[in-house]
Image: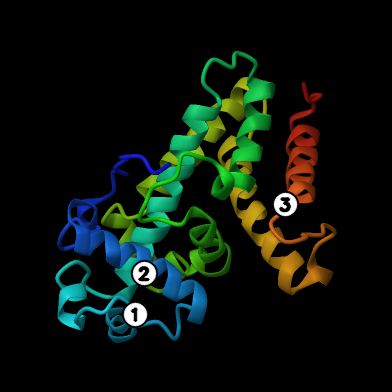
Amino acid sequence: MAIGIKISLNEKLYLRDPQESSLGKRIIKHSILLIDEIGFESFNFKKLALQMESTEASVYRYFENKHMLLIYLVSWYWEWVSYLIDINTLNIESPQRRLKVIIKTLVFASKDNPSIEYVNESVLHRLIIAEGTKAYHTKEVDKDNTEGFFLNYKKLSSKVADVISEVNSDFQYPHALASNLFEMANNHIYFAQHLPKLTDVKVEGEDFGEVEKMLEYFAFKLLGCEEE
């Protein structure tokens, strides 16, 4: 069942908030589907307008360009994962158990319910795996960073880093481990699907169990503790 969650994002990412109108929600819905289908390089607002049976001008009323739209989608996903972590770790006292649940959430966020009507989380997850790093692996990253475009990712990383520090307060690299868990989750799904000699895990369809197991191994070995 769809629910009425509004994800809070940097207002500088858009010209009009797409979550506030039916047209804006259609832009989000169809941009996810089209980028997943043809790739970000081939994607443009003209193709998007044709896909959603609207006009190119209507899309430009919401987003300045396709790069800003991609950052918006990636930021939406980061905030969605952060929301799921809060829900999934509620009332769990053990930091080891919370970290294990966090890892599972990072890997399987696309399968968690409830869903939001205008976002297909499964397709968005595929988009993040294939295209997500293009939001910040750019020449403009420093400028974009000063605008606060990556705050959602930083907050997500800090949230996970805090739990890592609870597990082992002497561990020197909690933020590095937190961001690496997120990047590894996506990279090794991608490698397993497209460049299998770069990983040791196998992915069958949307069964990412081996990826989850690998992340748990790295995390708890580095932290020098046993899983609960």
| Residue 197 found in image quarter | bottom right
- Colouring style: rainbow
Instruction: Kindly indicate whether the residue at mark 2 contacts the one at mark 3 (C-beta within 8 angstroms).
Output: no
Residue labelled with disc 2: 30
Residue carrying label 1: 51
* Mark 3 Cα-neighbour bin, 10 Å: few <14, some 14–19, many ≥20: some
The local secondary structure at tag 3 comes to loop
Q: Residue at x 26, y 50 (%)?
A: 10
Q: CA distance from mark 3 to mark 2?
A: 26 Å
Depth order, front residue of 19/106:
19
- Near mark 1 (Cα within 10 A), the count class, few <14, some 14-19 or many ≥20, is some
Q: Give the quadrant of residue 115.
A: top left
**Amino acid under disc 2:** His
Q: Is residue 58 above or below residue 114?
A: below
What residue type is disc 1 on? Answer: Gln
Mark 2 neighbour density, 10 Å: few (under 14) some (14–19) many (20 or more): some
Which numbered disc covers residue 208?
Answer: 3
Q: Residue at x 19, y 55 (%)?
A: 17
Nearest to viewer (mark 3 / mark 2) = 2
Residue 179 visible here:
no
Q: Which part of the image, by quadrant, shows the N terminus?
A: top left
Q: Which residue is situated farthest in the front direction here? A: 1
| Disc 3 residue type (three-letter) | Phe
Q: Dot 2 lies on which element?
A: helix
Above or below, 62 against 148 in this view is: below
